[in-house]
Image (spheres, rainbow, N blue to C red):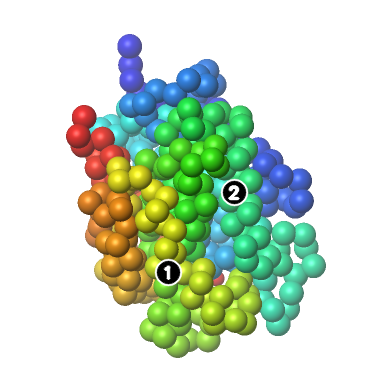
Amino acid sequence: MSSTFNPELDESFEYGTAHDLQTLTVDVPNSLSKTPDPSKCFLIYIHGGAWRSPAQSAADFDPARNLILNTAAYSDILPRIAGFASINYGLSSPSSNPSRIPGRNYKYPQHLQDIRLALDWLRERYNIGATDGWNYILIGHSCGATMAFQITSSLTPSGTGYRSPLAVVGIEGLYDLPLLLKNFPDPFYRQFVTDAFGDSEQNWADWSPVNDAKLGDTVTSSTVLTIAHSDDDELVDWAQAEAMKLAISKCKGKEKTLVVSLKGSHDDVWQKGVGVAEAIRQTLNKCYETE
Ligand SMILES: N[C@@H](CC(=O)c1ccccc1NC=O)C(=O)O
């Protein structure tokens, strides 16, 4: 018997009907059992793009997924992977020129509500993430990393019908929005934060994962929290990763914190795929290291 993952289904589905970005792509074996195999987990990706770039989408996960599936260098982690999913979600638009297209003028927490709908859909359809369901790892790039951590603290309290993710992987993530704006005075940064979160600076701090007191109460002590960042990132600095490391060190799961140093520019890490794939490899190895 080969343990190699052989995707039979690579499809786009609608997880909602409010607009055309409520879709996700799924890549799983057709015969996937509802009964989970505890030696495997699902990889669920949340793309970046500053909550508003029309150029980024669920397809951002393709280069890393293809590397993992087709490159001998990743054959060590392939047996751990039950499938891949990648989520599209509604976007913001410049407040100076608001879009009239449905799903293009989002304000927080609408983006996050779409992520939750997508996860609910995966849970209903494939039993991914249900209390008795498949294990999963949430992976996010840039603002996708922000949302991966934000959504985790609403999924994990008992009674939600979800199990804790095996890991949360933040790549080139935004974790402390006031600090980001302080370190990057270019008006573009303030603009995209305002477009997504409105004018209230308090709101920016409240939504920053570094200030999420619930994260530590909700993840289990075995949840791996990965902060991956590249020295070559020209758009987001290490100060974000450092701030999140400090915040995580106060969590119950701190012994499972993993810091991964990547190479390549902010967008190289997903466009070339090596950075995202490498963060996933190290995370999976950490998740299963005690076996
Ligand atoms: N390529 C994006 C820029 C972008 O995504 C970005 C820029 C600075 C800091 C973070 C960013 N994205 C995070 O999700 C754009 O064209 O809007």
Which residue position holds label 1? 211
* Left or right: residue 171 compared with residue 257: right
Q: Quadrant of residue 160?
A: top right
Counting the numbered discs, the total is 2
* Left or right: residue 168 compared with residue 74: right
Q: Residue at position x 25%, y 49% from top? A: 256
Is residue 121 placed above or below 3 in the rendered structure? below
Q: Residue at position x 40%, y 80% from top? A: 179
Q: Residue at position x 63%, y 54% from top? A: 113
Is residue 172 placed above or below 192 in the rendered structure? above
Number of residues whose C-alpha sits closer than 10 Å to that of mark 1, classed few (under 14), some (14–19) or many (20 or more):
some
For the residues labelled 2 and 1, say whether their Cβ atoms are less than 8 Å apart: no
Would you say the beta carbon of the disc 1 residue lies within 8 angstroms of ligand 1?
Answer: no
Whole-percent x and y of residue 236? 39, 72
* C-alpha span from label 2 to label 1: 20 Å
Q: Amino acid at mark 2?
A: Arg
Is residue 17 placed above or below 289 in the rendered structure? below
| Rendered-image quadrant of the C terminus | top left
- Mark 2 vs mark 1: which is more N-terminal? 2
Whole-percent x and y of residue 255? 22, 51
Whole-percent x and y of residue 262? 27, 59
Q: Residue at position x 40%, y 53% from top? A: 217
Q: Amino acid at mark 1?
A: Asn
Which residue position holds label 2? 116
